[in-house]
Image (spheres, rainbow, N blue to C red):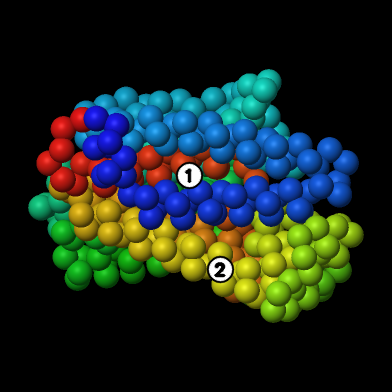
């Protein structure tokens, strides 16, 4: 049994994830060891990574199709967790996104990503042949609209954008007519100006700073990105060496272990390190897309498609805001940025992907 299990495991996917995880631990440690108590952040990330790996291996043993049966319950649990944030959440830096469990601060909006993927995958799989109908498009949109609104109220615009992109990506790979997809896109585009009035002042400032429509002086609103660009540029080809990046260790670069972890990595490992990271991400996305193609059913295909959109969105937006091609949104870099719930969620998604891959052949476990 174990031999058959190991034989059908996607070792390429797992190896890439393990390399990214180790690179993330190294980056978090290097970014924080000079800060008082900073060494605990890397240790904490390592601990939550092991918890995530535990869930990963558990999920590989569970048939992913079981989650299709309980998707309704999963959706209710997701909404209750997001509601609990509003009722019992802990406020940090003006945002109420976490539930303090004493030993751990749980961030339900991170878990909402994988839970939304499971719920949407079930709906898209059951109605894939009819996704050209407006009724099914609207119902699928409602599934994601409720958690998106709840997350925006925290406020967490970045995660809300990811949830929306997951839905949009899964809709794109469904059997929806391309003409209908264009109409949906135009409607969404027309609604974007209305979204402006729902944003908080700091969120508007970030967008204005990015677009140059506000005072984006490097000593004011554009400081974070300015320091990230300096850090990335100073790394040159081979980097300053781990622990020797002046931008992070002299505290010029803010949020160096979370939002701007990529800048730390590029400064200390250089262009070469950044390229290696991007290659690892490319292999990760390639394997996920391969699993989507290999899946024996549409439910597994939609799970893998949602996962691909989730990871790609995180990678593109996070690195984009580090190099000033995207506004700062607080979206973490998968497996690299520090964050307990984030690393657990990412590894849970990998566990689901492994479950799909293992069962793409007619094998009984």
> Mark 1 falls on what kind of element?
helix
Residue 276 - label: 2
Report the front residue among 320 and 329.
Answer: 320
In the rendered structure, the answer to whether residue 251 lies left or right of residue 262 reads right
Q: Are marks 2 and 1 in contact (CB under 8 Å)?
A: no
In the rendered structure, the answer to whether residue 217 lies left or right of residue 5 reads right
Residue 31 - label: none
Task: Find disc 1 in the rendering and name its residue.
Answer: 346
Is label 2 or label 1 in front? Answer: 2
Residue 338, image x and y in percent? 65, 46
Residue ID at (52%, 61%) = 315
Residue ID at (19%, 70%) = 179
Q: CA distance from mark 2 to mark 1?
A: 20 Å
Residue 145, image x and y in percent? 39, 45
Splitting the image into 4 quarters, where does residue 216 fall? Answer: bottom right
Quarter of the figure that contains the C terminus: top left
When the figure is inspected, residue 160 is found, relative to residue 276, above or below; the finding is above
Report the front residue among 315 and 109.
Answer: 315
Residue ID at (69%, 79%) = 237
When the figure is inspected, residue 191 is found, relative to residue 343, above or below; the finding is below
> Mark 2 falls on what kind of element?
helix
Residue 74, image x and y in percent? 35, 29
N-terminal of the pair, mark 2 or mark 1, is: 2
Q: Residue furthest top?
A: 102
Q: Residue furthest front?
A: 3
Q: Answer yes or no: is residue 221 visible.
A: no
Residue ID at (81%, 73%) = 217
Q: Answer yes or no: is residue 6 visible.
A: yes
How many residues crowd mark 1 within 10 Å: few (<14), some (14–19), many (20+)? many
When the figure is inspected, residue 202 is found, relative to residue 319, above or below; the finding is above
């Amino acid at each position: 049994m174990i031999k058959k299990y190991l034989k059908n495991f996607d070792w390429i996917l797992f190896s890439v994830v393990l390399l990214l995880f180790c690179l993330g631990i190294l980056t978090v440690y290097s970014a924080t060891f000079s800060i008082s108590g900073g060494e605990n952040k890397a240790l904490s990330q390592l601990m939550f990574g092991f918890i995530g790996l535990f869930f990963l291996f558990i999920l590989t043993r569970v048939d992913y199709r079981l989650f299709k049966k309980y998707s309704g319950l999963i959706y209710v649990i997701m909404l209750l967790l997001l509601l609990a944030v509003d009722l019992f959440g802990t406020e940090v830096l003006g945002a109420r996104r976490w539930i303090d469990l004493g030993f751990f601060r749980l961030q339900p909006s991170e878990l909402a990503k994988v839970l939304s993927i499971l719920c949407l995958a079930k709906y898209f799989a059951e109605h894939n042949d009819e996704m050209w109908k407006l009724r099914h498009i609207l119902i699928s949109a409602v599934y994601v609209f409720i958690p998106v609104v709840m997350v925006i109220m925290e406020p967490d615009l970045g995660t809300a954008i990811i949830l929306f992109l997951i839905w949009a990506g899964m809709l794109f790979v469904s059997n929806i007519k391309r003409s209908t997809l264009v109409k949906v896109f135009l409607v969404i585009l027309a609604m974007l100006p209305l979204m402006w009035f729902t944003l908080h002042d700091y969120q508007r400032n970030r967008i204005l700073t990015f677009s140059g429509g506000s005072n984006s002086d490097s000593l004011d609103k554009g400081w974070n990105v300015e320091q990230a660009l300096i850090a990335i540029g100073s790394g040159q080809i081979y980097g300053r060496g781990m622990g020797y990046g002046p931008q992070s260790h002299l505290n010029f670069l803010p949020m160096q272990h979370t939002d701007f972890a990529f800048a730390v990595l590029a400064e200390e490992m250089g262009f070469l390190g950044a390229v290696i990271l991007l290659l690892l991400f490319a292999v990760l996305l390639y394997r996920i897309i391969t699993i989507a193609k290999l899946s024996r059913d549409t439910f597994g295909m939609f799970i893998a498609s949602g996962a691909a959109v989730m990871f790609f969105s995180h990678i593109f937006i996070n690195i984009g805001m580090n190099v000033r091609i995207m506004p700062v949104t607080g979206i973490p870099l998968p497996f690299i940025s520090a964050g307990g719930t984030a690393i657990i969620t990412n590894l849970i998604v990998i566990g689901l992907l492994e479950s799909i891959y293992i069962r793409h052949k007619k094998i009984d476990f």
